[in-house]
Image (tube, helix red, strand yellow):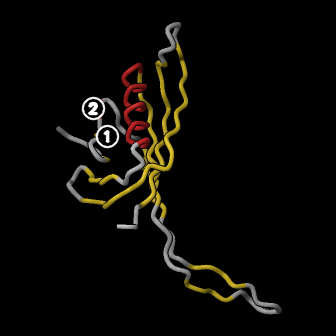
């Protein structure tokens, strides 16, 4: 079974009906500027901040709604989760900062035909 990424026991991929279409990875170099009167600011190293990942995609029908409920259940555990990509690389532990969804084309029983979603993760560096 092919997969894009696994967060804890949650599988992202077409085989699961829940694939992401974009991934944004942000890392910080730890630099800050110190304002100096009558001169250019001085660069100071404050230490690197945690990396952040943002996944986004589109899910369909009640299955997409159910998969988002599964992500929220993982979020509600309030625990760091291991993240492993489809080629087996371990990305370490990550915390779920946010799960967002936009439901559209909602039919009369409340099922969204299209669900645009975003998942925000932050590196868990306490371990």
| Quadrant position of residue 2 | top left
Q: Quadrant of the N terminus?
A: top left
Using the image, determine if residue 113 lies above or below residue 109.
below
Using the image, determine if residue 35 lies above or below residue 48.
below
Q: Residue at x 25, y 59 (%)?
A: 90
Few, some or many C-alpha atoms within 10 Å of disc 1 (few <14, some 14-19, many ≥20)?
many
86 sits to left or right of 111: left
Few, some or many C-alpha atoms within 10 Å of disc 2 (few <14, some 14-19, many ≥20)?
some
Which residue is most to the bottom? 38
Q: Quadrant of the C terminus?
A: bottom left
Disc 1 secondary structure class: strand
| CB contact under 8 Å: marks 2 and 1 | yes
Give the CA distance from mark 2 to mark 1.
7 Å
Which residue is most to the left? 1
Using the image, determine if residue 79 lies above or below residue 50.
above
Q: Give coordinates of residue 105: x percent, y percent.
A: 54, 17
The disc placed on residue 16 is 2
- The residue that label 1 is drawn on is 12
Q: Residue at x 69, y 85 (%)?
A: 34
Q: Give coordinates of residue 14: x percent, y percent.
A: 29, 34
């Amino acid at each position: 079974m092919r997969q894009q990424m696994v967060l804890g026991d949650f599988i992202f991929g077409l085989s699961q009906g829940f694939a992401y279409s974009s991934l944004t990875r942000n890392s910080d170099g730890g630099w800050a500027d110190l304002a100096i009167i009558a001169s250019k600011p001085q660069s100071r190293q404050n230490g690197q901040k945690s990396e952040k990942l943002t996944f986004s995609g589109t899910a369909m029908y009640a299955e997409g709604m159910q998969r988002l409920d599964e992500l929220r259940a993982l979020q509600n555990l309030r625990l760091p989760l291991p993240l492993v990509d489809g080629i087996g690389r371990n990305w370490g532990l990550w915390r779920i900062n946010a799960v967002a969804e936009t439901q559209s084309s909602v039919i009369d029983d409340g099922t969204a035909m299209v669900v645009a979603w975003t998942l925000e993760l932050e590196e868990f560096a306490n371990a």
